[in-house]
Image (cartoon, rainbow, N blue to C red):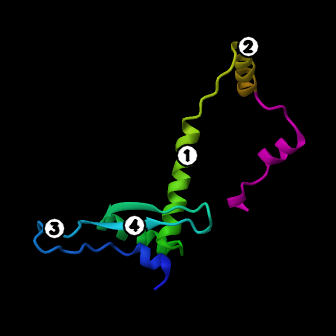
Amino acid sequence: MSAIAELERPATRKRVRGAAQQTPPSAADLTVIPAARGRHAVIINLRAPIQARELIDSAAAAEGKTRTEFMLDSACRRAQEVLLEKRVFLLAPDKYNDLMRLLEAPPRPSGALKRLLLGKAPWEK
């Protein structure tokens, strides 16, 4: 069994004689390992309901990816979206007015802009 497959399978709990009986876990342990292993790679442990794991596995298979690749890609894409949405631009009032004037002004007509607006959309070609 490969190292990734070994890490991606659900964790099992050992029963200890005399200890309080533990119920089987209702969630699977998922381990996400970056595709590029190296000194800077880290392991991320994640508990998820079995239904979520099955959904993720189906989506990963549909894209031809491993669960690890799919989860890492999805999490990084969402993280970038969140960080970009939270970006704050602080400007002095005069610079803010300049920026707003540029954003609200229509673009100057150019040959490239005219060709773009007069041409067919890529999906219509």
Q: Residue 1's image quarter?
A: bottom left
Q: Is residue 52 left or right of residue 40?
A: left
Spatial CA span between label 1 and label 4: 23 Å
Which residue is tagged 1?
Answer: 81
Residue 86 percent across, percent down from the top left = 54, 35
Mark 1 residue element: helix
Dot 3 or dot 4, earlier in sequence: 3
Residue 19 percent across, percent down from the top left = 12, 68
Spatial CA span between label 4 and label 2: 51 Å
Region of the chain picked out in magenta, as a range: 106-125
- Using a 10 Å C-alpha cutoff, classify the residue at mark 3 as few (fewer than 14 neighbours), some (14 to 19) or many (20 or more): few
Residue at 43% in and 66% down:
31
Amino acid type assigned to the residue bearing label 2 in the image: Asp
Spatial CA span between label 2 and label 1: 29 Å
In this orientation, which residue lies closer to the viewer: 70 or 24?
A: 24
- Using a 10 Å C-alpha cutoff, classify the residue at mark 1 as few (fewer than 14 neighbours), some (14 to 19) or many (20 or more): few
Q: Is residue 57 left or right of residue 41?
A: left
Spatial CA span between label 2 and label 3: 65 Å
Amino acid type assigned to the residue bearing label 4 in the image: Leu
Which residue is tagged 4?
Answer: 30
Which residue is tagged 3?
Answer: 22
Amino acid type assigned to the residue bearing label 3 in the image: Gln
**Which one is in front in this view, the residue at disc 1 or the one at disc 4?**
4
Mark 4 residue element: strand
**Which one is in front in this view, the residue at disc 3 or the one at disc 4?**
3
Mark 2 residue element: helix
Which residue is tagged 2?
Answer: 94
Extreme-bottom residue of the structure = 1
